[in-house]
Image (cartoon, grey):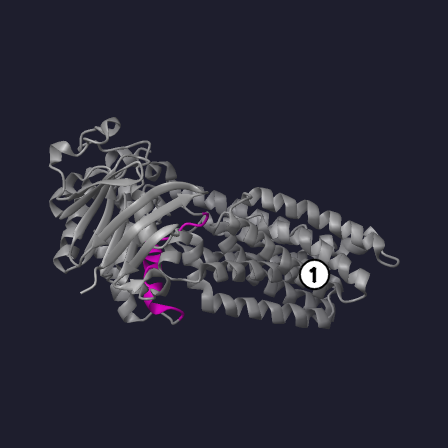
């Protein structure tokens, strides 16, 4: 049977395409700043948000957006204050997010850890038209913001001090990136689950890095890899009846493996002009 | 006419520990001022305060006659940091990195043909036109330093501040830097640079500030070549030394 004939598959595919675009588009800036695990940290915090939604009787997606955004902003402020190193701040987020989620779901009426499972591992086939509206709105918002502020974000992530000397609003741009990362995590939560969100933000970027040299080229290849993994994961899970989130991530990793092999072969070929331009001592390094 | 840089009675502290105290650095248009001194003398701290990266504990700073707090003419100020911010998590090409310097002028608008020409001109000015599409991470330390200089040149600044542009840079790149700076100085650009040793830049310098222990020891004509290391016996290495392996620029690969 044609999977596109089923409404839940159409919704799932649309969500997958959006997440496949947005996650690497935001993730490339996190990787550039060497904060590849930030998406994971936000994902853990979002779990507290989901549980809070069950406790308050509101939509878990909305509370997850708010709590994840607050968590991301706090992480960014801690990082800017420079008192705690980035990895320790991330570790605090990991523990606080999971513990808060399990604690709050226990307090929610009739809540059990089972309620959290679909958010931890995704439940793409249970995506409702309402979810797709939320996912689409947030995705388009993030992509528009990247279109407007992308070059500024690149400058800040590449060299924060130089950006400050140039008069760029560095603090505001960093907070914007943190909020966009939080929105991306919440958008992707239904598709791949909070525990695997960061994979879609990082793995396509790592894949692109195996093949291309520039930032813009990395973005383009990463978006293609993200959409390819997301769409083929959803379709594949329909035919082999497996969890789509896990299949998407496994396919993304497989793409990375292929790219790494291709990249290694390409790099082994001598690039005469460039090698000759290096001083002899450096070419040997 | 007001001086390009007017730093007066400046003190800067890290975590409450004073790094420089009561420093005056007044630079007029067209001057090429070198700030010299040993490691830890406070020379980099002074220029980082000049570009606004470090707050003053006491004293005042004016750029082009405007107090720093009100200064908004970002395109007039070009800054070349000490460490090459070259190898971040995602590779970027020479052109992409240099183009970020132009953001001070373009803001949020799309870059147009004039902006692309300015970026190309800056890349050519530092002699890297043939490497424009290469990843910055594949360049040598000296070439990476030239990328950062090109980035600072994209807005054709009136004041160029360079923090240790010669540290850990091979002689070829030092000479290229001297040629580039020579052209800028002829066009009237004011230059403030921090250096351990002046090397091929020596003939460009119109005035030198020598620092020790966070204070200015000497402010006047540049020292003669053979006296350059008089306050810095530990670093009395010859100017032809190609690699300084302790310098951060070499640790980036």
Q: Residue at x 59, y 46 (%)?
A: A89
Asked if residue A279 lies in the magenta stretch, the reply is: no
The quarter holding residue B214 reads top left
Q: In the rendered view, does B229 fall on the left or right side of B251?
A: left
Q: Position of residue B52 (x, y in %)?
A: 36, 55
* Residue on which disc 1 sits: A64
What residue is rendered at 68% in x and 53% in y?
A: A45
Query: Dot 1 falls on which chain?
Result: A
Name of the residue lying farthest toward the right: A110
Q: Is residue B212 visible?
A: yes
Q: Nearer the viewer, residue B34 or A210?
A: B34
Residue pictured at 19% horizontal, 38% vertical: B171
Count of labels in the image: 1
Name the element at disc 1.
helix
Horizontally, residue B172 falls left or right of residue A205, namely left
Seen in the picture, residue A220 relative to A282 is either above or below; the reply is below
Tell me which residue sits at (17%, 59%) in the image.
B29
Residue B4: image location, x then y, percent: 22, 59
Quadrant of the image for the C terminus of chain A?
Answer: top left
Q: Judge whether A126 appears above or below B134 on screen.
A: below
Indicate the position of residue B85 as horizontal and vertical percent values.
Answer: 37, 47
Is residue B95 on the magenta stretch?
Answer: yes
Residue A236 versus residue A270 in the image, above or below: below
Does any portion of residue A239 appear in the rendered image? no
Q: Residues within 10 Å of mark 1 (few under 14, many from 20)?
A: many
Please give the range of residues in magenta.
B89-108
């Amino acid at each position: 049977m044609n999977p596109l004939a089923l409404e839940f598959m159409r919704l799932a595919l649309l969500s997958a395409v959006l997440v496949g675009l947005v996650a690497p588009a935001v993730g490339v800036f996190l990787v550039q700043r060497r904060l590849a695990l930030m998406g994971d940290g936000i994902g853990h915090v979002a779990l507290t948000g989901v549980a809070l939604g069950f406790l308050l009787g509101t939509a878990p997606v909305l509370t997850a957006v708010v709590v994840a955004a607050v968590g991301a902003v706090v992480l960014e402020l801690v990082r800017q204050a420079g008192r705690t190193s980035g990895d320790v701040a991330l570790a605090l987020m990991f523990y606080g997010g999971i513990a808060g989620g399990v604690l709050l779901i226990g307090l929610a009426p009739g809540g059990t850890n089972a309620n959290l499972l679909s958010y931890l591992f995704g439940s793409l086939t249970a995506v409702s038209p309402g979810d797709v509206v939320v996912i689409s709105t947030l995705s388009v918002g993030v992509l528009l913001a990247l279109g407007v502020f992308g070059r500024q974000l690149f400058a800040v992530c590449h060299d924060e001090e130089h950006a400050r000397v140039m008069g760029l609003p560095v603090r505001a741009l960093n907070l914007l990136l943190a909020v966009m990362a939080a929105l991306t995590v919440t958008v992707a939560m239904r598709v791949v689950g909070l525990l695997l969100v960061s994979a879609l933000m990082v793995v396509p970027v790592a894949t692109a890095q195996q093949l291309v040299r520039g930032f813009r080229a990395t973005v383009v290849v990463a978006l293609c890899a993200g959409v390819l993994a997301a769409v083929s994961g959803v379709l594949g899970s329909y035919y082999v009846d497996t969890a789509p989130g896990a299949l998407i991530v496994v396919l993304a990793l497989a793409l990375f493996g292929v790219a790494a092999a291709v990249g290694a072969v390409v790099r082994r070929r001598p690039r005469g002009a460039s090698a000759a331009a290096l001083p002899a001592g450096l070419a040997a390094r | 006419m007001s001086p390009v840089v007017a730093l007066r009675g400046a003190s800067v502290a890290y975590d409450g520990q004073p790094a420089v105290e009561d420093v005056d650095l007044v630079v007029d248009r067209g001057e090429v001022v070198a700030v010299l001194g040993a490691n830890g003398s406070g020379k980099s701290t002074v220029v980082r305060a000049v570009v606004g990266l470090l707050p003053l504990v006491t004293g005042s700073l004016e750029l082009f006659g405007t107090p720093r707090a009100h200064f908004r003419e970002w395109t007039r100020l070009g800054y070349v940091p000490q460490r090459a911010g070259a190898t971040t998590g995602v590779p970027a090409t020479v052109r992409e990195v240099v183009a970020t310097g132009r953001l001070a002028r373009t803001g949020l608008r799309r870059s147009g043909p004039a902006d692309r020409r300015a970026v190309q001109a800056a890349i050519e000015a530092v002699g890297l036109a043939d490497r424009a599409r290469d990843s910055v991470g594949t360049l040598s330390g000296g070439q990476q330093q030239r990328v950062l200089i090109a980035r600072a040149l994209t807005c054709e600044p009136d004041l160029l501040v360079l923090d240790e542009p010669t540290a850990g840079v091979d002689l070829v790149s030092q000479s290229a830097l001297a040629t580039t700076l020579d052209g800028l100085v002829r066009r009237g650009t004011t230059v403030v640079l921090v250096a351990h040793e002046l090397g091929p830049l020596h003939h460009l310098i119109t005035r030198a500030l020598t620092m020790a222990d966070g204070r200015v020891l000497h402010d006047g004509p540049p020292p003669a070549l053979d006296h350059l290391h008089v306050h810095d016996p530990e670093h009395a290495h010859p100017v032809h030394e190609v690699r300084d392996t302790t310098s951060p620029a070499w640790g980036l690969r």
